[in-house]
Image: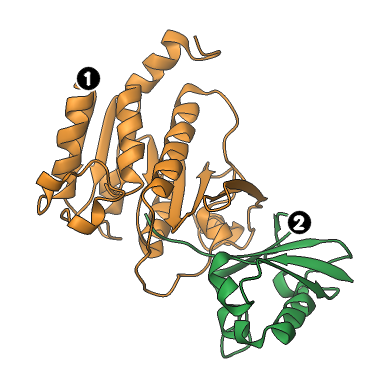
Chain colours: A green, B orange
């Protein structure tokens, strides 16, 4: 299943400046695994050493927060994910 | 005349007491436009002093203010802009110990901070005291805004659970100008009682590509700040 992931600009450095990456997967977690498979350097930008999603990374599926299911949240062909990072400047 | 606003709307603004946490990049435009709009009382809290590096975005502070306390510098300009508005500057760091007293007596809280821990304190006190809370944050060309109505809508902690690792947040000055004005717009609409608020929504502004996106949010029943367990303890 093809899903488009829109990346936060801080992650472009890991994807050869690609803002959008096409991945395959039936859950958010599988989609992120495919993203990491395509761009291994992105992994520490998304996951901690314990393998859990970093707590300042948020995932939206079709513009809706994926929390609390997050990685287990099912996705379907044509869905759009956004990976956002907390921003805190003022 | 703006529909639904009129003299009655202006009177409502005059009666309002707005607490602004931070006199920096977000606080400068938010405070400026709320003062210009004729809000009755503004309390602006900041413990920092003006530095040269602030001047690209913190437009209430000028070159001649370098070294001055930001609260004083901001209050001085705001009073000149509209002397009908009572502006109080408080030169304190917002902490868990003083936050309840600082916001006491205020109708709305504007988040113009530069760090997540203080934002979480503001979110929590806003929920405890049932005070509407207007969040904004920026980084580079990116900005975000959301409005929280305690007990009714998703709160900041429903959306964010973490803290970004300690770092400087580089910002192009126009980004907080956009977001601070959005926060001021939300405040004015709330006070006057018109329009649609950014509740249960996170507005994301991408200045580089000049796009706005809206992400839909839900109240988290297990939220540390507003979830059922927390409410049950009260």
* Residue that mark 2 sits on: A62
Q: Chain letter for mark 1, please.
A: B
- Measure how far apart labels 2 and 1 are at the Cα level: 46 Å
Figure check: A1 above or below B35? below
Left-right relation of B143 to B196: left
- Determine the residue positioned at 14% across, 47% down: B63
Are labels 2 and 1 on one chain?
A: no
Left-right relation of B104 to B68: right
Mark 2 nearby-residue class (10 Å; few <14, some 14–19, many ≥20): some
Identify the secondary structure beneath mark 1. Answer: loop
Residue B84 is marked as: 1
Mark 1 nearby-residue class (10 Å; few <14, some 14–19, many ≥20): some
Mark 2 vs mark 1, foreground winner is 2
Q: Chain letter for mark 2, please.
A: A
Any part of residue B93 in sight: no
Figure check: B67 above or below B178? below
Pick the front one: B192 or B210? B210
Instruction: Report which quarter residue A68 is drawn in.
Output: bottom right
Left-right relation of B22 to B1: left
Instruction: Report which quarter residue A40 is drawn in.
Output: bottom right
- Determine the residue positioned at 42% across, 9% down: B7
Figure check: A2 above or below B62? below
Q: How many marks?
A: 2
Pick the front one: B213 or B3? B213
* Image coords of residue A73 (percent x, y): 78, 69
């Amino acid at each position: 299943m093809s899903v488009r992931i829109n990346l936060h600009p801080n992650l472009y450095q890991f994807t050869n400046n690609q803002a959008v990456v096409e991945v395959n997967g039936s859950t958010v977690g599988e989609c992120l695994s495919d993203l990491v498979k395509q761009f291994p350097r992105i992994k520490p930008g998304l996951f901690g050493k314990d393998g859990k999603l970093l707590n300042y990374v948020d995932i939206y599926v079709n513009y809706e927060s994926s929390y609390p299911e997050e990685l287990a949240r099912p996705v379907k062909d044509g869905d759009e994910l956004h990976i956002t990072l907390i921003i805190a400047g003022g | 005349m703006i529909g639904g606003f009129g003299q009655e709307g202006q009177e409502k603004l005059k009666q309002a007491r707005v607490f602004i946490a931070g006199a920096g990049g977000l606080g400068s435009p938010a405070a400026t436009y709320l003062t210009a709009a004729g809000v009755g009382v503004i309390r602006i809290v900041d413990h920092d002093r003006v530095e040269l590096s602030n001047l690209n975005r913190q437009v209430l502070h000028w070159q001649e203010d370098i070294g001055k306390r930001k609260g004083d510098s901001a209050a001085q300009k705001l009073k000149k802009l509209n002397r009908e508005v009572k502006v109080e500057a408080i030169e304190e760091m917002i902490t868990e110990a003083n936050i309840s007293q600082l916001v006491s007596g205020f109708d709305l809280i504007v988040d113009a901070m530069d760090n997540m821990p203080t934002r979480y304190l503001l979110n929590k006190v806003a929920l405890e005291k049932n005070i509407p809370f207007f969040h904004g944050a920026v980084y580079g060309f990116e900005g975000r805004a959301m409005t929280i109505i305690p007990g009714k809508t998703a709160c900041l902690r429903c959306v964010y659970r973490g803290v970004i690792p300690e770092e400087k947040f580089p910002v192009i000055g126009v980004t907080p100008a956009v977001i601070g004005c959005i926060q001021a717009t939300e405040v004015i609409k709330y006070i006057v009682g018109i329009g649609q608020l950014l509740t249960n929504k996170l507005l994301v502004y991408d200045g580089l590509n000049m796009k706005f996106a809206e992400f839909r949010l839900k109240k988290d029943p297990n939220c540390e700040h507003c979830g059922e367990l927390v409410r049950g303890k009260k």
